[in-house]
Image (cartoon, rainbow, N blue to C red):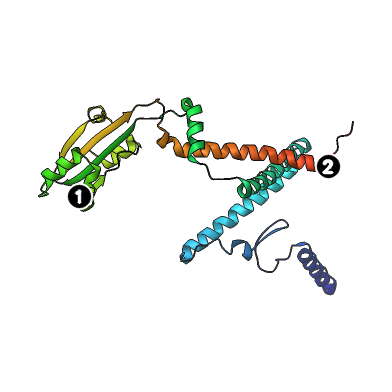
Amino acid sequence: MIRNSFLLVFLLVCSCNYFKPQQKSQSIARVGKNYLFKSDIATLVPVGTSKEDSLLLVRDFIDRWASQKLLIEAAEINLSDAKKKEYNTLIKQYKIDLYTRAYIEEVVKRTVDTVVNQEELKKYYEENKENFKTNGTLVRLRYINLSKNNPRFGTIKSKFFDYSKKDKKFWETYALQCKSFAMNDSVWVDMSQVYSKLPFITPDNRDEFIVSGKRIEKTDKNDVYLVKITNVIDKNQISPFEYSKPILKEVLLNKRKLELIKKFEKDITNDAIKNNDYEIYK
């Protein structure tokens, strides 16, 4: 009797172990028939992370992995067949869209001409000026910020406001004595850059300073700002060509890409028809 009871217990233990999933080599967690392996987290923890933080990162990753597995299993069991069919159709279409988009992007990257010459930019700008309007005020200016105790301050000030290209060598020497400067007043900048470089100008007082032809001498503690506002374009006006060039180039490149994609799709379809790989049955 004792022998039979021992045999029954042994068979029950063996039976339980038989039905219990065995841990797979190198696995660190299991949800149902899904296993998470050490290789899955090999690059998870950044080099130099402390042991405590490493454990937290790994545990958080395992918990999220388990939650996702449990949720997908629950969803597959509880969602209706109609809903699953609908989502599977969306998943198939998403794969198609993802693959074709990636392939076309590679073709475009290898094929499209990214060189846009000045004539193309100018022509497109002239034909579409109304589409390139300013989002805010644009300014052309030059400025210097220097110590008011500079021994050549009077000369610097005079040459700054009566700027001449023949003074190039003078500015090569004395611009280096300035704390900051920008002498190229042929470049258009937006107001955010003005506020950044000239802190005494603010949104509240900008109308006092941002005026075409305005000469400014502003003392700030031990420093002096000398500013010449060359030109101003207000918001919602047509942007200057030079300022619009980066956007123009982007627009023309996108236009080329779209034309190339359209041609590529047409060519690949025509080739399939020619090779009898594409037929429409009537």
Left or right, residue 64 beside residue 76 = left
State the SS at label 1: helix
Q: Residue 70's spot in the image, x, y percent?
A: 67, 50
Q: Give x and y (percent) for residue 145.
A: 20, 45
Q: Where is residue 90 in the image (x, y as percent from the top left)?
A: 71, 39
- Answer above or below: position of 265 versus 150: above
Q: In this view, does 82 lie to the left or right of 51?
A: right
- Number of other residues with Cα within 10 Å of mark 1, as a class: few under 14, some 14 to 19, many 20 or more: few
Choose between 241 and 189: the one closer to the eye.
241
Kindly identify which residue carries mark 1: 170
Kind of residue at badge 2: Lys
Q: What is the residue that sits farthest to the bottom in this orientation?
A: 3
Mark 2 burial class by Cα count in 10 Å: few <14, some 14-19, many 20+:
few
- Side (left or right) of 66 relative to 83: left
Q: Alpha-carbon distance for marks 2 and 1?
A: 72 Å
Q: Where is residue 163 in the image (x, y as percent from the top left)?
A: 21, 40
Amino acid carrying mark 1 in the image: Phe
Is residue 65 visible in this depiction of the protein? yes
Residue indicated by mark 2: 274
Using the rendered image of the protein, determine whether residue 202 is visible from the camera's viewpoint.
no
User: Residue at position x 22%, y 41% from top?
Assistant: 164
- Figure disc tally: 2
